[in-house]
Image (cartoon, helix red, strand yellow):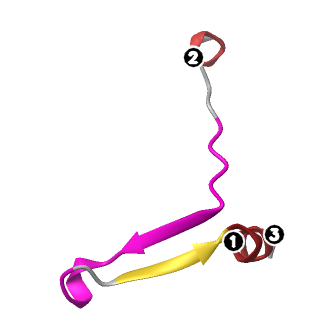
Amino acid sequence: MALNKIAWYRLRASVLYFIDNSRGFGSRERFESGHLWKNLQK
């Protein structure tokens, strides 16, 4: 299988910033790891 030949990586960021330039240049929203994990489990 082709997927077995891929080197997989996992990133564990404590803080992520989502940047949305459609709302204004440099408009960003901060998400901390605890809040992200709770939202992903819903």
The earlier-in-sequence mark between 3 and 1 is 1
Residue 6 marker: 2
Q: Amino acid at mark 1?
A: Leu
Choose the circle earlier in sequence order: 3 or 2.
2
| Amino acid type of the residue tagged 2 in the rendering | Ile
Q: Residues within 10 Å of mark 2 (few under 14, many from 20)?
A: few
* On screen, residue 31 above or below 1: below
The residue closer to the viewer here, 4 or 27, is 27
State the mark number for residue 16. none
Name the side, left or right, on which 27 lies relative to 6.
left
| Residue 41 vertical placement versus 5 (above, below) | below
Residue found 80% across the figure and 76% down from its top? 42
C-alpha gap between disc 3 and disc 1: 9 Å
- Horizontal side of residue 6 vs 23, given as left or right: right
How many marks on residues?
3
Q: Secondary structure at mark 3?
A: loop
Asked whether 16 falls inside the magenta stretch, the response is yes
Which mark is drawn over residue 41?
Answer: 3
Q: Please report the residue visible at 57 percent of the width from the left and 16 percent of the height from the top.
A: 6
**Which of disc 2 and disc 1 is earlier in sequence?**
2
Identify the element where label 1 is drawn: helix
Instruction: Tell me the element at label 2.
Output: loop
Gap between marks 3 and 2, in whole Å? 27 Å
Kindly identify which residue carries mark 1.
36
Q: Which residues are magenta?
A: 10-25
Q: Nearer the viewer, mark 3 or mark 1?
A: 1
* Residue 32 percent across, percent down from the top left: 65, 73
Q: Residue at x 59, y 66 (%)?
A: 15
CA–CA distance in space, label 1 to label 2? 27 Å
Amino acid type, mark 3: Gln
Q: Residue at x 52, y 78 (%)?
A: 30
2 on left or right of 21: right
